[in-house]
């Protein structure tokens, strides 16, 4: 029995990569310094895994921005608009594809981003053309394998599987299916494998998480053909086939007949699949099984007793030599090291395991499964005691919350009247023009703003002094918005850190780490709250600054909240009760906040739910159960207000086609969505469905530093106008502006307002 991993976090213990990338982008460090930071992180990761007993360590799991973007460069899958960039300047090309580029005579937009399966990680979406060719362009996978070899570590290089790579992308022209490109793509894989085998690589990890989806027969045939071809050309190469985030499901019998050495199983998301495999007539007991027992997506301590029972079950059909112990998926989704946390409450800390501790758990499980390793029995008892303590802890349970959940009624999730009635009342109350303009909520968080918050947190700034600074920043932002002519204003969220962390800090049932950072996309890192117990709200969370902002102006100001599903999805959520129950607890807390905002004169309230689509189970047969409770939770949070109070929601980087009716069931008065990177393609779902409520299709990409021209915004608005009722269209950016700088923000918003006003003027001319 051996140990292995699918991947490891890559941002550094204290976000060293994030800081280096952002310094490089702003010309504060050179390429050599950036590369040294990257090499230091990779070296530290490899040596730590080796020191903690991981037998087969992955390489090529590091990335400056995103592993699928890396794959695009590896396979020479570079959209034509980047041909103006010198291909010898690799990092400029790489980051231009990720972030866009405005420099000298170059002005290119970034590639589209979307969620990585059902996680809060975002990947860059590959773009494909008919008859596209591929080349072995970036040699990163080879270079990293060699780097590890210099340390004396023979790694398992990680490749995204060819079928998954194609399925994750999109066709940029009609008349073909992206899987038609498989025969063009495979020769590049063969070239990569040839180079790796020349370097004496023994195992190659192929990530095919598409095997957790509902695949067509054609797609399964492509999987079979792919791995048969690889085996034919490289019969001695050991293929480690990794699926994660769910079972193999109906794809299992296809997978069991593939000529691969090892099958990886996510036994956290789908523990029952082990029985299906062991009982299948197609299972070859000589196939190695990698048991993904340690949770790669959450931070709760493993239950050794339960895991050992699974190992024992597997060992009855598979020899110990053919079993691997691993995490369920890459540890990319977990923080680095619990040992860094000195401020966590000890009782809660004993229930947790971050990436480093998960390495120790994997190794301990291997040793506990070997009868001769009695020295590890004390770790077993310690683990058992921690899990028992968690079950019995008084920190977790609140009888008042449980009673309120038990007393929920159907009417608690319904607005008083239908949207058509509410819309008329809201137009009278708000008196907004055609094509009303707004932003999504946050404004740039400058170094000064962040420093105030840090000083306040450390006790170096008094409450009075901190409040004075925040109030001044809010007033300045209100005056700027009034000056450029926005129609619905925001207070800017200068007092907030993260859109989920901020609320978690003010709710009971949450704990927080100091260094629990995980990558969301590129240099964007989030520190998810630890949702360990029953959730409740003792007092208002956002009313103070929202009420203050509204007192400064006669123009409507939006109250800004994060929705219950997003708080759930973007936290490390307790795994001892149904997620639906936890979500309803959060919904009731948000509902109380919404009512308080309305009572203080806020007539527009936004409840952001960017994670609704993300939480969707991977298999369609599981969708209805999730969508029923997720939509209901949002409605519980939003339905306590009067008809003339306008409820907004925001969603970004999601595909809506399959769930558009459920989005409509949320019954938000206005929904704002990301559409600029897809050039309004994501709007098609709303148009085809005839979405009944108002929509703000984002008209510029806030994840890129480039400033959109007036003409660009006009063109996107015209696309929206051609397919949506003009009385339903809002004009707004794709997402919040927290990560942008003020100069680019001001320029972009001025263009946005000008475009909306120009469109209004054209309507008046037509009249």
Image: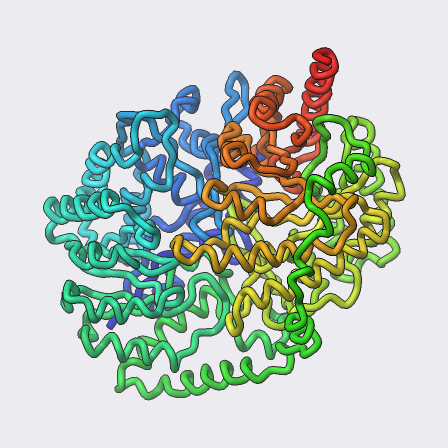
Residue 307 in the image: above or below residue 567: below
Residue 528 in the image: above or below residue 345: above
Q: Residue at x 51, y 82 (%)?
A: 386
> Residue lying farthest top?
765
Identify the image quadrant of residue 93: top left
Q: How many marks?
A: 0
Residue 189 in the image: above or below residue 700: below
Percent coordinates x, y for residue 635 in the rendering: 65, 54
Percent coordinates x, y for residue 433 in the rendering: 77, 27
Percent coordinates x, y for residue 63 in the rendering: 42, 45
Q: Quadrant of the C terminus?
A: top right
Q: Quadrant of the N terminus?
A: bottom left
Identify the image quadrant of residue 252: bottom left
Camera-nearest residue between 645 and 561: 645
Q: Residue at x 72, y 31 (%)?
A: 437
Camera-nearest residue between 60 and 704: 704
Q: Is residue 440 left or right of residue 221?
A: right
Q: Is residue 578 left or right of residue 741?
A: left
Percent coordinates x, y for residue 432 in the rendering: 78, 31
Residue 150 in the image: above or below residue 340: above
Q: Is residue 514 left or right of residue 757?
A: left
Identify the image quadrant of residue 29: top right
């Amino acid at each position: 029995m051996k140990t292995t991993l699918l991947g490891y976090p890559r941002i550094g213990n204290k976000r060293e990569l994030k800081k280096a990338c952002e310094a490089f982008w702003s010309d504060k460090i050179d390429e050599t310094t950036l590369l040294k930071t990257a090499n230091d992180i990779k070296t530290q990761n490899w040596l730590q895994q080796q020191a903690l007993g991981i037998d087969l360590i992955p390489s090529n799991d590091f990335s400056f921005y995103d592993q699928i973007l890396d794959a695009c460069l590896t396979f020479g899958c570079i959209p034509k608009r980047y041909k103006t960039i010198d291909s010898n300047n690799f990092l400029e090309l790489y980051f231009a594809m990720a972030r866009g580029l405005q420099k000298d005579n170059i002005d290119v937009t970034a590639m589209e981003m979307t969620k990585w399966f059902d996680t809060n990680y975002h990947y860059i979406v590959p773009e494909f053309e008919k008859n596209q060719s591929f080349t072995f362009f970036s040699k990163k996978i080879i270079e990293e394998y060699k780097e590890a070899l210099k340390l004396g570590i023979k790694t398992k290089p990680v490749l995204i599987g060819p079928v998954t790579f194609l399925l994750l992308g999109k066709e940029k022209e009609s008349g073909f299916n992206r899987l038609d490109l498989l025969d063009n793509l495979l020769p590049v894989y063969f070239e990569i494998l040839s180079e790796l085998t020349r370097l004496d690589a023994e195992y190659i990890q192929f990530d095919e998480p598409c095997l957790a989806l509902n695949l067509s027969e054609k797609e399964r045939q492509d999987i079979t053909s792919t791995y048969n071809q690889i085996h034919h050309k490289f019969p001695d190469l050991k293929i480690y086939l990794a699926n994660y985030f769910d079972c193999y499901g109906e794809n299992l019998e296809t997978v069991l007949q593939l000529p691969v050495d090892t099958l990886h199983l996510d036994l956290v998301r789908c523990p029952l699949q082990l029985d299906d495999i062991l009982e299948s007539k197609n299972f070859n007991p000589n196939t190695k099984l990698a048991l993904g027992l340690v949770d790669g997506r959450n931070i709760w301590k493993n239950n050794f007793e339960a895991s050992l029972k699974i190992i024992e079950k597997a060992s009855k059909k598979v020899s110990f030599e053919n079993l691997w112990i691993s995490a369920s998926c890459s540890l990319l989704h977990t923080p680095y090291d619990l040992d860094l946390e000195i401020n966590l409450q000890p009782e809660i800390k004993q229930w947790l395991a971050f990436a480093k501790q998960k390495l120790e758990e994997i190794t301990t499980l291997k040793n506990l499964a070997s009868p001769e390793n009695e020295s590890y029995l004390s770790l077993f008892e310690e683990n058992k005691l921690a899990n028992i303590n968690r079950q019995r802890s008084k920190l977790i349970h609140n009888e008042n919350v449980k009673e309120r959940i038990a007393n929920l009624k159907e009417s608690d999730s319904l607005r008083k009247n239908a949207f058509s009635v509410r819309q008329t009342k809201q137009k009278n109350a708000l008196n907004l023009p055609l094509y009303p303009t707004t932003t999504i909520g946050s404004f740039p968080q400058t170094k000064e703003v962040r420093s105030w918050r840090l000083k306040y947190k450390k006790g170096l700034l008094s409450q009075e002094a901190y409040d004075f600074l925040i109030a001044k920043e809010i007033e300045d932002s209100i005056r700027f918005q009034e000056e450029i002519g926005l129609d619905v204003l925001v207070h800017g969220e200068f007092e907030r850190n993260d859109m989920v962390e901020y609320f978690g800090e003010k709710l009971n049932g949450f704990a927080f780490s100091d260094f629990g950072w995980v990558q969301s996309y590129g240099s964007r890192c989030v520190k998810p709250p630890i949702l360990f117990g029953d959730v409740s709200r003792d007092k208002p969370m956002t009313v103070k600054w929202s009420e203050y902002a509204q007192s400064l102006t006669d123009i409507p100001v939006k109250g800004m909240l994060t929705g219950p599903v997003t708080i759930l999805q973007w936290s490390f959520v307790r795994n001892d009760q149904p997620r639906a129950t936890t979500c309803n607890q959060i919904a009731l807390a948000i509902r109380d906040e919404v009512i308080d905002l309305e009572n203080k004169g806020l007539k527009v309230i936004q409840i952001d739910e960017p994670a609704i689509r993300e939480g969707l189970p991977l298999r369609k047969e599981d969708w209805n159960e999730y969508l029923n409770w997720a939509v209901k939770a949002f409605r519980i949070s939003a339905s306590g207000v009067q008809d003339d109070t306008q409820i907004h929601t925001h969603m970004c980087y999601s595909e809506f086609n399959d769930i558009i009716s459920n989005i409509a069931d949320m019954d938000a008065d206005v929904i704002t969505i990301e559409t600029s990177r897809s050039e309004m393609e994501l709007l098609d779902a709303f148009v085809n469905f005839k979405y009944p409520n108002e929509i703000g299709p984002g008209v510029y990409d806030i994840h890129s530093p480039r400033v959109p021209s007036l003409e660009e915004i006009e063109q996107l608005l015209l696309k929206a106008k051609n397919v949506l009722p003009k009385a339903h269209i809002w004009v707004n950016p794709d997402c919040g502006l927290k990560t942008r700088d003020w100069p680019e923000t001001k320029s972009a918003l001025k263009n946005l307002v000008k475009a909306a006003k120009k469109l209004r003027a054209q309507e008046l001319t037509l009249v």
